[in-house]
Each structure stands twice: as C-alpha cells, then as structure tokens.
Amino acid sequence: IFISHAQVDHELAEEISDLFSTGMGINAEKDIFCTSLEGQGIPSGKNFVQYIKDEIKGCKVIILLLTKNYFASHFCLAELGASWVIAEQCTHENDDEVIVIPIVVNPVSRSELDSVLTGIHARKIEVSSDWGEISDEIKRAINIDFKGSKWERKRDQALVRVKKLVKKKKYTTPIPAAEHDKLKKRYSDAQEELEEMETQLKDKD
C-alpha cells in the first residue's frame, strides 16, 4: 500500500497507516510505504524520485490523501498523475489490478477535486461507511482477511482521532526558499518520469 500525502499531513497519514496495521494486520514496515513515517519511507542514500517511482509501480493499492496541502504541492500532484498512469498501464497490459483510492479531507471542495479527478468517486476520511468500502477494496486487492469486529473497533477509534486532527489542521505552510527550490527540482524530475511513462503507454496502443 502506497500512501501519497503532503509531508505536513503526516499525522493523518500515520493514523491511516496504523489503522491498516492494527485493524487489518498489514505489516507496516514491509507492506506500507509512507515517506513521512519512520521505517516506512525512503532509505538513506536512495534517489528520492526513483525510489518513489519504483514503490508506486510495485503497489497494489495507492491511497491519495487529498488535503488542501496536497493540492498545494506540485510533487504530490505528480504522484497523483503517476498513480493513474500506472493503474491504467496495468489494466492495459492485463497485469494485476492497481486500485487507486482518493480520500478527501475537509475543507477540500468539489471544484478542487474536479480539477484533477473529474468523474472519479472519492471517499471522505471522516465517514465511517466509506472506510467500510475502503477495507473491502483493499481486501480484494491484496487478498487478505481479517475479523470484522476488530476492524470496526480500530476504525472507530481511529476516526475519533482523525476528526480531532482535521478540526485543528492548519493549511498555511510556508517553507524556506531553498527547500522550495529542492521541491521544484523533484517535481520537475517526477514530471519527466510521468511524461515518459505516458509516452510508453501510448506507444502500446
């Protein structure tokens, strides 16, 4: 499972990762990739863009944690685009299906969602029934089973914490100019990778 999120939203990403681990029994360090969490991110000495690209390619499920911060990040949007290209590529090549699950976090608006995910149904992070659908999709994607009562208990506990995080969340996240330049370079590299993947996909049509 790949959790695509903005760095400043690491607390929400951690809640989702913990829910998958404690509620579904998924090995967090082995089977969940989340760049901001210890043991689940990019190892020292690895190329940032290349490692993320390889991880996305190897995943069965891609979670898009769609916050205001996510839409403000060029690099997150590049990850989003890469996710859809890879999902389409797997379908085109008759490989195992890759499931992309967009999860909306208030106060993201429908207009923001439509600008990048037109016509795509997204789940809402605070809605309990949506997490039931998410768990069913993950079950099918990675062929796991877990007890419903345990999942429901862990889900309800996580949602209490998630709602508190969403309520206090701030979306003004200025960063130093040097860090901004690094992110722009990473975004540029990711865009080149994405364009190359799109070209390869078109060539196979």
Image (spheres, rainbow, N blue to C red):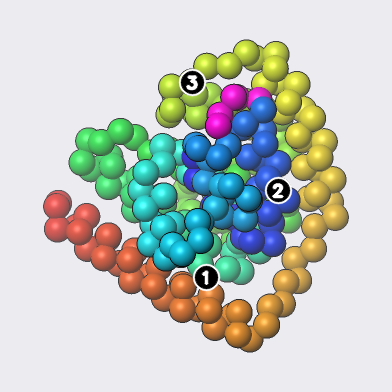
x, y (%) of residue 64? 54, 49
Is residue 192 a member of the stretch shown in magenta? no
Query: What is the three-letter code of the residue carrying label 1?
Result: His
Q: Describe residue 136's horizontal placement relative to residue 23 as left or right.
A: left
Task: Please say whether residue 31 is visible from this viewpoint.
Answer: yes
Residue pictured at 52% horizontal, 16% vertical: 145
Instruction: Nearest to the eye among marks 1 and 2: give it.
Output: 2
x, y (%) of residue 128? 71, 30
Mark 2 to mark 3 CA distance (whole Å): 24 Å
Give the number of marks: 3
Q: Main secondary structure of the magenta part?
A: loop
* Residues tagged 1 and 2 counted as in contact (Cβ below 8 A): no
Identify the residue under disc 3. 144
SS at mark 3 in the image = loop
Identify the residue under disc 1. 74
Residue pictured at 38% horizontal, 39% vertical: 98
- Magenta span of residues: 23-27
Task: Please say whether residue 134 is visible from this viewpoint.
Answer: no
SS at mark 1 in the image = helix
Q: Earlier in the sequence, mark 2 or mark 3?
A: 2
Instruction: Nearest to the eye among marks 3 and 1: give it.
Output: 3
Query: What is the three-letter code of the residue carrying label 3?
Result: Ile
Query: What is the three-letter code of the residue carrying label 2?
Result: Leu
Identify the residue under disc 2. 12
Mark 1 to mark 2 CA distance (whole Å): 19 Å
SS at mark 2 in the image = helix
Mark 3 to mark 1 CA distance (whole Å): 34 Å
Please, is residue 76 above or below residue 30 in the view?
below
x, y (%) of residue 195? 30, 67
